[in-house]
Image (cartoon, grey):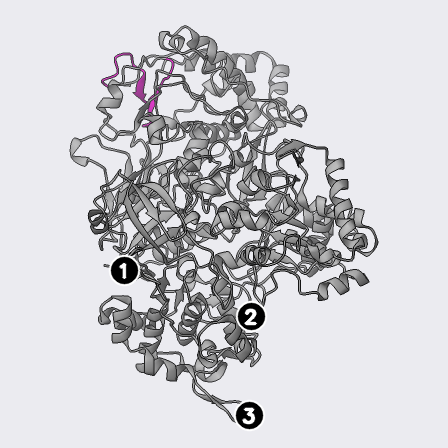
Amino acid sequence: MPGVPPMTWPKGRPHDAGRRNFLRAGAGVVAGAPLAACSSQDPYSLEKPSVPGAERWNLHEEKTIATACAQCPAGCGISARVVEGRVVSVRGQPGNPVHPGGIGPRGLASPYVLYDPDRIRGPMRRQGGALAEVSWDEALSGLATRLGALRSRGRPDRLAIVCGRERGMIRDLWERFARSFGTPTFLDVSLRKDGATASALYAMQGVRETPAYDWPRARYVLSLGAPLLEESCQSVHQARSTVHYRTHRGAERGTIVQVEPSYSRTAANADEWVRIAPGSYGALAMGLAHVLVRDRLYDRDFIAGRAFGFENWTDDQGRTHRGFRDLLVRDYSPERVAECCRIPTETVERLAAELAANGPSFVVSRGVGTRERGALHTAMAVHALNALLGAIDRPGGLLVQSDPPTADWPSLELDDLAQASLQRPGIATSSRPLGSRGIDDLADALLAQPAGSIDTLFLYYSNPCYSGMDPARWRRALARVPFVVSFSPFLDETTAEIADLVLPDHSYLERWEDAASAPSVGFPVQGVRQPLVEPLHDTRPSADVVLELARQMGGKVAEAFPWPDFRAALFERLSGIHEAQRGSIIEGSVPHFLRALFRRGFWEDPGSPRQESIRTPSGRFEFFSLRLWQGFGESWLRESGVGIDRELACLPHFADPAKHSSPDFPLLLEPYQPGSYAEGSGANLPVLQELVTEPGDRAWQTTAFLHPDTADQAHVAAGDRVRIESPLGSIELPVAVRAGVHPDVVRIAKGGGHTAWGRFALGRGANVMELIPHELDPFVGTPVLQGVNVRIRRA
Amino acid sequence: MMIPRNLTRRAFAHRFVVSALVAASALWAFLMSSPRRALAGSPERERTVATDDEKRKWGMAIDLDRCTGCGACVVACRTENNVPATGSAEESDGTDILWMNLLPLEDRSEGSESAPEMLPLPCLHCEDPPCVPVCPVGATYQTGDGIVAQIYDRCIGCRFCEVACPYGVRFFNWDAPEWPTSHLNTLNPDVATRPAGVVEKCTFCSHRIRSVTESARVDGVSLSDTDFQSLPACAESCPAEAIVFGDLNDPGSRVALAATSPRADQLLEHLGTKPKVFHLRRERRH
């Protein structure tokens, strides 16, 4: 055979003698090679460190274990390859309905989460300013004494709990603990991600969750700034479904149009990119609705049969209220909208006509598009547009994700103290019309109230001193809490700088858990997590710590948690799926069911009957939201200082976000989430730090992207360093110049600039959150991240 | 290859005939152990490799119409093939190694959605690889099934191949690889790490090909195209199913069909290197 040189292998090829032996044997062979001899260390002699439990594995033994990724809320199923007690790699779970087969870069980096050299090794307590090791018994009994004292003083409301997981039984467990303990201050992070979209669904459809978009059956999708392929949540599902949507149907190729100020990754992968002025999504949605109504292109059966508030209506008192049609027709002509969005009028007309002509179609807006001022009403306008297209609860449109039929835990019995304490307002209570509140309310509340109003704060998967708006303000707020407990497995900013007690959780590859998935396919899916290896360090699953704390509280609090460990609590609820006797796993007994479930990694029920999808007070889809009408009240509108007519506030509309534009700060900040390491929690993973997925970006860095004209005006070129200043603060970054960036913006990825989080994250790039002042949307409380005024100058 | 194939076969047969007892016990051992274990324990058996390999011609198709540029292939390749991270541009100073690279394309973002931004670029395993003839020591060669392979122990680090490759997919190890101790746990035991001073490159995950074909041979089952389609780590990981692998000599395989698609491109085709990786152009509405 030409080109094949004669060769003989050394004894001990990689695939015969033990693989580990090969690494050693190879060392002997190479040691003689002159070049290898130049290197000071012997490169083949890599001896893997010992790991707990390895003695129970045979040489070369390997297993494939099903579990679920927890790098983002999507909860993709993964199959891990475990060799001799070590997790070597993961792959996507074959057959998983959410993302058959494939898996994203973050999921693939899972083993590096487990083996992060800077993981916290065991519980720690702050002594004299520094964290020092402490035993679990000491840490837990100390904490239990503190919590017991709060209860004996009759003030359990002085405990606050922040739960960084939006879904799943661990969230339920924390909430159960908060209630049985008696604190009304239980906060989560769900508003941060898709809070506006979920709130719009609640206001108009009565469902407090984001919709599941039925990609496989749609033909045309218009995305108003939705970061479908960047944002970690469900990006794998999105990549999968957008691709199938376009390439698996022969002539019926689906179309995706991305409307966004800058050329994002989603825009780069769409069929068409429409550049729109920053902050004008809501106007476009209303303009499109106007054209649909004007040209009678909307789903008249749905509007007539299942909708409320489209036409003007009269209430019980005989008062006439404005309908959606009236608002649309008067205020949102395509010409006006086009001017506001700075796009041609024809584009508005064409997009509306295409949406109507290529049904089933739907409009999606989440993420960036709904993190501006007026996010609720933008999201409502998009949802109204979907209703006009007849996309609500229809194949090829927006479905309501059904939950798996898990069993309930025994109903919660509260003791008198908890009952009384839960009546207290608590800190960070929401007066917002839809009652929504989240972690970002905590900073406000802590700063507004006397120090010590919250005595003890639990932070579970939450690092506000890095990921919150204005991290310095968060530091000030948390300094007012006498005792902060962190459950993070990693030494993040909040844990390293603020926490008084650190009770490190297992990593997600070491613990038992359910894996609740963000809405995706519509039908119920239940994923599970199980330990792949024995815990590496002296960590404990936080769920078990909750059970232990409850036990030490005694009385009704202890009785509320009757399980020996969380695994028992988990199995109890999962057994409900077995009782239902449907879906992809049907077995004769609970143990058989659980065995099959944990072997496969997920349960699904595509044939599940769909739940009622419209759950509003009127029983119809509400263009005029009655929940908002009741929630607002004149007094709230007056007190909150939101200058808006109560009637208008209940209807989808576009309120031009006051840009506070000043000659000093002529540009707008456009923070975005890179696909690779999200909002920063993946920055400790070198394989992700080294991953560049955008032209102009560089590994291990944060980059400020500018339009060529913007760069010219600032007299900077690619590679120069610039200082980006906002009214709040400034950061310094290298510049990349791209024609796809909107000329009015500075585009900066989140995730850089860690001051903790381990050796790989530390000091890389800059944290864009340091430029963003604390501002919450007054209606729902979502953080306003888009539209901060900035300026740049050469550094 | 100078593997004494006939001799081994004869030796194997000889043993089989001479002692029925040995044969029975060998059969029993074979049946009782997993294919993987049987392989690992018996180098003789492994050397009776069927010549199927040489009838195959491995190739890959990367459909840019599906690729979203997420980078899963890059991470999957790194973890599968024990490629260490090298640090930022300043720290690595151009020494970074990417068997699978996401190559940024020129900024054409102003209204040209038909061009991708990022191009996944593994070794193209050319049919006429310019890197092979320049190697003065025979450290790089083409296997019978078309993989351009590298023998690290032979490589003298002259980097001729790196210069000869028009695609920039060969990488020189300026330093010995380094991992934090705990990261050593994630090293794939199927792939050796490379020392300083040698050139390394994408292997089409030949260790996986070998594992699958050997297991099938031992089990006596025949393999079909579906067994290969997502065999390399990059193809397996791709959330968008953009990467298809397989036998170009099998006219019905997905990769062979993709290679004959009117959308199929071979990078720098005019050089006559005949890459066996095909990039399929985008289709967009406009």
Which stretch appears magenta? Answer: B133-153
Is residue A261 in the magenta section?
Answer: no
Q: Earlier in the sequence, mark 1 or mark 2?
A: 1
Q: Which residue is mark 2?
A: A434
| Residue sitting nearer the eye, A387 or A631 | A631
Is residue B145 in the magenta section?
Answer: yes
Residue at the image position 41 percent from the left and 72 percent from the top: A381
| Residue A211 visible from this viewpoint | no
Q: Position of residue A320 (x, y in %)?
A: 47, 90
Q: Which residue is mark 1?
A: A275
Q: Earlier in the sequence, mark 2 or mark 3?
A: 3
Name the chain under label 3. Answer: A
| Residue sitting nearer the eye, A154 or B216 | A154
Name the chain under label 2. Answer: A
Q: Earlier in the sequence, mark 1 or mark 3?
A: 1
Q: Amino acid at mark 1?
A: Arg
Q: Main secondary structure of the magenta part?
A: loop
